[in-house]
Image: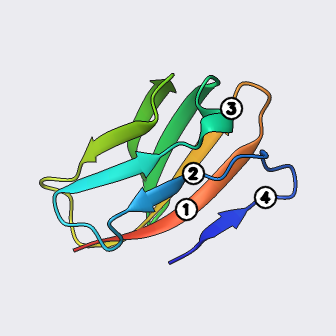
């Protein structure tokens, strides 16, 4: 699944892997976004918040998905200026 960028999206493009994921999801933050303070949110298909986490100066962020139900989720990453990126992923 590909990422969706909002019109006021950031210049950087984070990626997730693997997709679909079973136990672990990795968020790869590109060089140009690495030194921002980023907030990551994961929502389930019903819009319920599953995770809220701050990412500071990390090229790769690991998210544990153990115990999460199978389904489609949305990862939203925002920087301090409000630019955001949404990435859809599947939990197996």
Q: Which residue is mark 1?
A: 87
Q: Which residue is mark 2?
A: 14
Mark 1 touching mark 2, by CB under 8 A? yes
Are there few (<14), some (14-19), or many (20+) residues within 10 Å of tag 1? many
Gap in angstroms between the C-alphas marked 1 and 4: 11 Å
Chain-order first, disc 2 or disc 3: 2
Residue 6: mark: 4
Chain-order first, disc 1 or disc 3: 3
Q: Which residue is mark 3?
A: 79
* Residue name at image x 62 percent, y 23 percent: 35
* Residue name at image x 49 percent, y 43 percent: 41
Residue 53's spot in the image, x, y percent? 43, 31
Mark 2 touching mark 3, by CB under 8 A? no
- Asked if residue 30 lies left or right of residue 92, the reply is right
Chain-order first, disc 3 or disc 4: 4
Are there few (<14), some (14-19), or many (20+) residues within 10 Å of tag 2? many
Relative height, residue 38 to residue 22 (above, below): above
- Asked if residue 2 lies left or right of residue 45, the reply is right
């Amino acid at each position: 699944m590909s990422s969706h960028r909002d019109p006021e999206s950031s210049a950087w493009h984070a990626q997730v892997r693997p997709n679909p994921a079973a136990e672990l999801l990795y968020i790869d933050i590109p060089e140009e976004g690495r030194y921002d303070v980023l907030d990551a949110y994961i929502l389930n298909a019903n819009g319920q918040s599953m995770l809220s986490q701050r990412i500071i100066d990390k090229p790769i962020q690991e998210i544990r998905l153990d115990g999460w139900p199978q389904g489609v989720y949305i990862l939203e990453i925002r920087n301090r200026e409000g630019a955001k990126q949404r990435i859809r992923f599947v939990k197996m």
